[in-house]
Amino acid sequence: MDLATIRHVAELAELTLTEEEEKRMADEIGRILAYVAELDAIDTADVPPTTQLASGGEDAWRPDAEEVGLSHEDALAGAPRADHDGFGVPAFVEG
């Protein structure tokens, strides 16, 4: 991964990286991409797809059943700020 790409992605993410961090990120992401390419090269044509969870097969799926949850008041009780019968959050879009 080249430094120009690292700088571009950091700018998009609004991150400020030092030159040392840029070089480290380029190296680390380059190694990750090389490993993914290595995995991609493995022939998996004869490997059947798996459809079970690692921990227990089809029985591991819970039934999709409605359950009683928190009341509206209880859900908002732990909120740092409630606003208009919901969670109050800071504005992030300038009007």
Image (cartoon, rainbow, N blue to C red):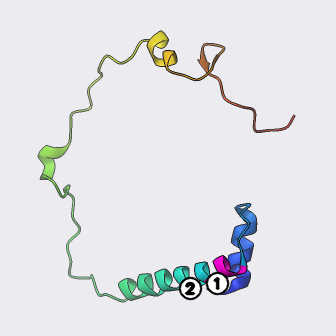
Q: Nearer the viewer, residue 31 or 68?
A: 31
How far is disc 1 from disc 2 in space, using C-alphas? 6 Å
Front position in the image: 7 or 47: 7
The answer to which image quadrant residue 53 occupies is: bottom left
In the rendered image, which quarter contains the C terminus? top right
Image position, residue 77 (x, y; %): 50, 15
Residue ID for mark 2: 27
- As for residue 35 lying within the magenta part, the answer is no
| Residue holding disc 1 | 23
> Which of these two is toward me, 6 or 24?
24
> Which secondary structure class fits the magenta region best?
helix
Provide the secondary structure element on which disc 1 rests: helix
Q: Check the image and report above or below for 16 versus 52.
A: below
In magenta, the rendered stretch is 19-23
Q: Is residue 25 above or below residue 57?
A: below
- Quadrant in which residue 41 is drawn: bottom left
Question: Residue 44, percent across and down?
Answer: 27, 82
Q: Amino acid at mark 1?
A: Lys
Q: Residue 2's spot in the image, x, y percent?
A: 66, 87
* Image coordinates for residue 62, horizontal then vertical, percent: 21, 37
Residue at position x 39%, y 16% from top?
A: 70
Residue at the image point whose x is 73% and y is 64% from the top: 12
For the point 48% across and 85% down, the residue is: 31
Disc 2 residue type?
Asp
For residue 22: magenta? yes
